[in-house]
Amino acid sequence: MFENLTGSSKAIGSLVIGTVFSCIIIIALYWFFGTEIGSAIRATGNNEKMARALGVNTDTTKNLGLMLSNALVALSGAFVAQSQGYADVQMGTGTIVIGLASIIIGEVIFGKRFSFWYRLMSVVFGSIIYRIIIAIVLMLGMHPTDLKLLTAAIVAIALAIPVVKKMLTARVSRKKKNRDMLSPDPDNRGRSNGNA
């Protein structure tokens, strides 16, 4: 249909429609998680005991979160079936790993120190980067059956990067602290001589 209306290829049409719907869903999620119910869901996800202490019914918020996530999964499955023109029982195999990889890659590359809309965008960009990596590997000649191994390696690397970064930062700060303790401080020496 898009091809008939615009004269563009199906790939470009899928890209445009995917971008538009991603933007709409990000805006809708940002609005929803800014409401009282959405904030309660976020609080339950961050610290369930604290949310319960603040009077939030955490069982209800967990159910709402599951309902929302399943609705988004169903919507994305419908888009995939619409794009490919058919649906199969095996189409969703390994999708949870792809979603996890997208979230981890987005958080590692873009960080999670900014506002909530930035985190939502980082997940979308993480999924794009993940798909680009898969496409490059397939173009280099890797067999499609080895993609599960590649996906596991990407997730492992993405999980290891923040840990390694934290260890390196701790090591640098420790070395700096040791250097400061070992180097004589001329101000302290002058004060001690003046006091004596």
Image (cartoon, rainbow, N blue to C red):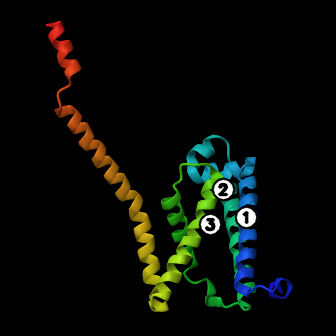
Between 185 and 73, the one nearer to me in the picture = 185
Element at label 3 = helix
Of the 4 image quadrants, the one containing the C terminus is top left
59 above or below 196? below
Compute the Cα span from label 1 to label 2.
30 Å
Amino acid, disc 2: Asp
Residue 129 position in % (x across, y down):
54, 71
Of the 4 image quadrants, the one containing the N terminus is bottom right
Residue 154 position in % (x across, y down):
44, 73
Element at label 1 = helix
- On residue 23, which mark appears? 1
Label 3 vs 2, first from the N-terminus: 2
Residue 86 position in % (x across, y down):
72, 92
Image point 69% across, 84% down: which residue?
A: 11
Residue topped by disc 2 = 59
| Residue neighbourhood size for the residue with mark 3, other residues' Cα within 10 Å, grouped as few (<14), some (14–19), many (≥20) | many
Image point 62% across, 45% down: which residue?
A: 52
Residue topped by disc 3 = 124
Residue extending farthest right: 5
